[in-house]
Image (tube, rainbow, N blue to C red):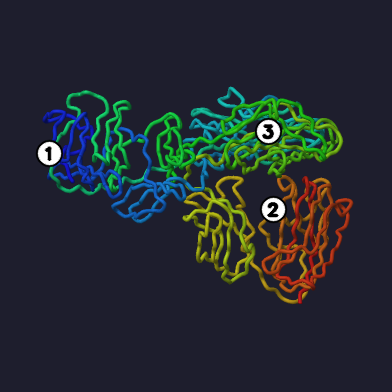
Amino acid sequence: MRYTALSTGFLIFLSIASISYADDFVPEGETDVTFSANVLTLDGDDTGGDIDLQFGNTLGETLQWDSVNARFSLSDSLDLQSQELINIRIENLVSAPICDAGKLGQIYYNTSDKLTYSCDGAGIWNPFENALNATIEFPVVQARRTTSFTLPTTYGDVDLDTTDLENDVSTLDHDDTLRDRIDIGATAMYQIIYGYTAGGSATGTHEARARVRVNDTSVLPGSESVNKNYQGEFSTTSASFLANLSAGDFISLQLQRDATVDVTQDEIYFSIIKLEGIKGDPGVPGADGAPGSVGLGTNENVFTLDQDDSGGDVTLQFGTTLAEFIRWDDTNSRFLLSADLDLASAQLINTRFENLPSAPSCDALSTGRVYYDTVLSKPLVCDGTDWVELGSGGGSSTPQPLATALYRDSSSTNINSAATDNIVPWNIEDFEDSTFLHDTVTNNSRVAVTKTAKYLVSGSVNIVSTVQRYNGILKFRINGTTTLPVTFQPGYIRSASGQNETSLTFSTILDLNAGDYFEVLIDRESATGVATMIPNSSSLSVVQLVASGSAGSSTPFVESVSPPVIGTNSTFDITITGTGFIPDSTVSIPGFPGTINTTTVVSPTQIDLNITTVAVQNSYDIVIDNNGTDNTTWPGNGIDSLEVLQIVGTGAAGTYTESFETNFGSWVSSGLAAAWTRNNGGTGSAGTGPNGASAGATYIYTETSNPNFPNVQFGIQTTDFAHAESISFDYHMVGADIGVLELQTFYDGVWTTRFTLSGQQQGAQGDAYLNQFIDLSPFPVEGLRFFYTSGANFAGDTALDNIVIISS
């Protein structure tokens, strides 16, 4: 049944009457319409079926009660004239409906995967939220000083002559004129990292200090570091901390020394990262809906309810028994619908989400409800349990607050021997978001979290020691039981006597559940002497990497490539495992001369490749790209450089001798962290390395000076001797920090160790090389590799010469 009432545009408040009626008016010829006490009832006799309120005979636009689907339906778009949608839920469906040109801009909430989707008009439903809940490329700047810097006796700014990375100058800018400054363009939380190596002659006491100052006035909390050693030459210091900075600020790195002259070696680096998340652009508006059909009813364009202005709620009711309605809620000054509103693919025009300063209740009945948080300045959607950010897969960058905390310690905690785990206390809170729970008095070593997420934990522990040799050992402990290793820069120092200071900088990512807590533990290698923490110089920064809500393109995290070694002139299937892969992920292999035939994203944790190689031997990086964000974008994001596609050769019978006089001969680098070096004469490091070659004038060796220690891997290999029966070689291994030398054979995609030698083998640098013979006849051989892992410090130069291979 159809009733004709209102004018074009559907001004739902039904006012500005062009004609007046008594409160008990019943339209002529409509026996099932009643009107009393400010309520107009359509279908008063409960005939049932669809009930239409039509606007104009010719116009034919309608507000309909859809009896089949039990909801209201409008024949065209709804303009709320900048008013809010109050207490609204997006349509809930278990699977995607049809998406075509007529549905462009339509949205729905999927109750199966708990994501919100929009139709692109071409059959694709795009998720608003990022299912991986990860962040992508942050604004970052990295600058360096490439020339030496003499430390002044009072703090002085460091001019940085090189800008390595600067991806958003409006947010972070290395000043082109005042080269000691990094200009801050946005008010936010920042992670700041610096590092340098300073020293001088191996006499006296060397003390170097560093800090970061803002606006040439105040020192940032947690930025200060100190390194002190006695009769040492060089020592490396770095720091990583968090800081709240404002738009218009600038920061500078400052260094200072004591009376003994100290000059920086290698390079000084200074990196700043703005911590933020990502959400995307709004979708394209959908097309207008189709007009309604023509019906009968009143000839007036405006029908006014409550013409006598008696006040209170005013209701347009559909059916006496059905009693569905649209009501003017006089108390809250808003319209109420008694059931869902179906716009029939028409648009919501000029509308705003409900504005609230805090989150209302979110439960199963509220699934899909949306509101705009006026404090967070973002829209949120209820997933049935929690409020999460309503984002966009488009990936445009707008700030998303991340939970952060910065702690420091002012005590002088004693560091016992390696037999005891020493718990690092944190008795100062510089700042702490509600995500973290920490007490500065009771169990102040513990930092607890209230949300399940990944957390970036970094900082430094500064130590003073009287022992002659000191090496700090850091660990994390979860919930008092589970102990994890730490990625850190070791604080190894060695001196004849006196007081020594060093900074141990650490950084790792922890997977924590709500209610978990973690602690930082420190031991030392030496069992005698005294070692204590330096008051007010150790800091701990914590960042929640996965914030509640959305992000744009996620950052892929590569864990492994299988198989890691394949042959030449053939086609192979390669499996890449990791996290963060998306359907649009692409794979590239920079410098690879072969062909990537197919790329298949199997799941968020697996990508399969089919590739064809050519007759080229080399190692290559695998790069996964998620719409412009790849696995080499920022430090610590998985394994970026892998030993892959190392081609396996064949070889010929006979005797092969190599002494590296003109080049590396048949040997090539394995593509590991460090490469073997050709050399003649000494290696340049006191107390380690030979004085010359064993055969001829040239040999190869591992240069283990900074940064090639500790546990840095060197590899050199050949695939020209597929049927090697034996190998012999001369070696020279002298130095306090000699690591582990291995001879490995390759077969069927796997490297296997056949010989191992560790520790110092000669007594002095001038001693003769030793010779080693290895019988390879029991093993299938497609390749050979010398694999060396460096020791604890720089005195680990290991040399090889006079290699002889006999092949059948």
Look at 61% across and 63% down and name the residue there: 645
Q: Secondary structure at mark 3?
A: loop
Rendered-image quadrant of the C terminus:
bottom right
Residue 656 screen position, x and y as percent? 76, 71
Q: Residues within 10 Å of mark 3 (few under 14, many from 20)?
A: many
Q: Which residue is mark 2?
A: 674
Q: Quadrant of residue 267?
A: top right
Which amino acid, mark 3? Arg
Q: Is residue 37 left or right of residue 250?
A: left
Which amino acid, mark 2? Ala
Q: Earlier in the sequence, mark 1 or mark 3?
A: 1
Look at 68% across and 26% down and name the residue there: 427
Q: Earlier in the sequence, mark 2 or mark 3?
A: 3
Task: In the rendered structure, find residue 514 and report the number of the disc placed on it.
Answer: none
Q: Which residue is mark 3?
A: 446
Q: Which residue is mark 1?
A: 298
Q: Earlier in the sequence, mark 1 or mark 2?
A: 1
Residue 156 screen position, x and y as percent? 64, 27
Distance from disc 1 to disc 3, alpha carbons, whole Å, reads 74 Å
Residue 513 screen position, x and y as percent? 61, 41
User: Could you say which is closer to the camera, residue 399 or residue 302?
Assistant: 302
Mark 1 near mark 3, Cβ–Cβ under 8 Å? no
Q: Is residue 80 left or right of residue 585?
A: left
Residue 431 screen position, x and y as percent? 59, 28
In the rendered view, would you say 8 is above or below 682?
A: above
Q: Is residue 84 left or right of residue 444?
A: left
Q: Secondary structure at mark 2?
A: loop
Between marks 1 and 3 in the image, the one whose residue lies nearer the viewer: 1
User: Could you say which is closer to the camera, residue 333 or residue 533?
Assistant: 333
